[in-house]
Structures are given as structure tokens and as C-alpha cells.
Amino acid sequence: MIEVPRHVAETQRRRTPSERAAERSRRLATETVLLDITKTFAISFVPDLFAALERKPAYLEVAWELFKDEVDLEALDARTKHIVALAISTNRSGTYLIDVFPQTFSLSPVGSRRCEIILSMIGMFQTFSGYLSDMAAFHTPTTTRAGIVPRRTPRILRRPQ
């Protein structure tokens, strides 16, 4: 039998039913978008550009819809969609393949104009993801018997110090 660490079990017990429902809702939203990505590209994996956004379901959904529209995925044949999926995947060093081989993707059926769009979208997503990860919830300290514990204050964001 696998033992659940105490801090994980306590965290799960402290969640209210509404918090658990919200977590299930976020997980379902993420799974729905990831399934749409794999179906659209007709592949068995999620390209790294979108896999990196898995923990931000609202941002993932908006990013996917924007990407589909800007790249005009609906107008592409299956082979070209596979090439686009490959382009937005990364190599072992974490660099997108379209950055590593820009000339190759420009000469492919994807075309140079669509490659420019993909590169600009990657840059935009990376910049915005960096901005989101730079934001943190504001914590106010609370004194307990165990000492000072940070307490999360909802809906207040600040840049970490």
C-alpha cells in the first residue's frame, strides 16, 4: 500500500468541497483543451508549447484558440499539421525546433509567413508566461503556536521581493 505523505493528506482534508470541485473543474478544462490539441494535430502527444501551460487552464485555452486562429490550422492538411506540431516541440535543451531549424520549416509546406507567425506566437506566450510566473499571491504573516506562518490573502497580487 502506498503511503500518502502527511502534509499532502492534511492539505487534502482541509480543502472544502467547493475547493475540490473547483480543482476538478480546472483539471477537466485542461484535459478538454489538451484533447482538442491532440485531435486537431492528429498526434498522440501534446506539443511542448502547450504542455508548458498545463497548470494554467484559462491561459492554456485562450492560447490554444489564438494559436489555431492565427496559424489557421483548419486550412492545413494532416501532414502540414504534423509539421507544425513538430515545430512547436522542443529538443533536449528546451529550444523549440522551429528556432533550431528555421530554414527547414520555412521551406516545408508550412511556409515562411506561417513560420513567422508561429515564432511570434512562441515569443508572446513565453513573455506572458514569464509575467504570470513572476506574480505571486500576497502573503500576510500569522502567528501560531508553531511560529509565524504566511497566510494567503486572496485576490491581491504583487511582484515577489
Image (cartoon, rainbow, N blue to C red):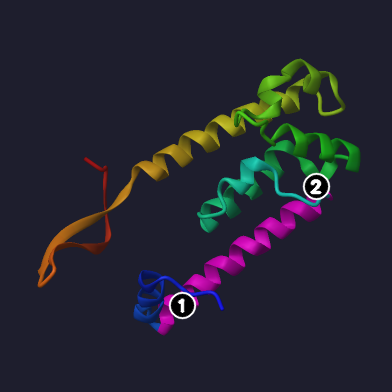
Residue 51 part of the magenta-drawn span:
no
Question: Mark 1 or mark 2: which comes first in sequence?
Answer: 1
**Residue reaching furthest bottom?**
17
Q: In this view, does 161 lie above or below 147?
A: above
Task: Determine which residue is flagged by label 2.
Answer: 41
Q: Position of residue 48 (x, y in %)?
A: 65, 42
Span colored in magenta? 17-42
Q: What's under tag 1, amino acid-wise? A: Arg
Q: In this view, does 126 lie above or below 102?
A: below
Q: Nearer the viewer, residue 128 or 89?
A: 89
Q: Where is residue 106 in the image (x, y as percent from the top left)?
A: 78, 20
Q: How crowded is mark 1: few (under 14 residues within 10 Å), some or many (20 or more)?
A: few
Q: Which of 100 and 1 is in front in this view?
A: 1
Q: Position of residue 68 (x, y in %)?
A: 71, 45
Task: Give the label on residue 20, or none.
Answer: 1
Predominant secondary structure in magenta?
Answer: helix
Image quadrant in which you'd find residue 120: top right
- Disc 2 element: helix
Residue appearing at x 69%, y 35% in the figure: 88
Residue appearing at x 76%, y 20% in the figure: 112
- Disc 1 element: helix
Residues at badges 1 and 2 in contact (C-beta under 8 Å)? no
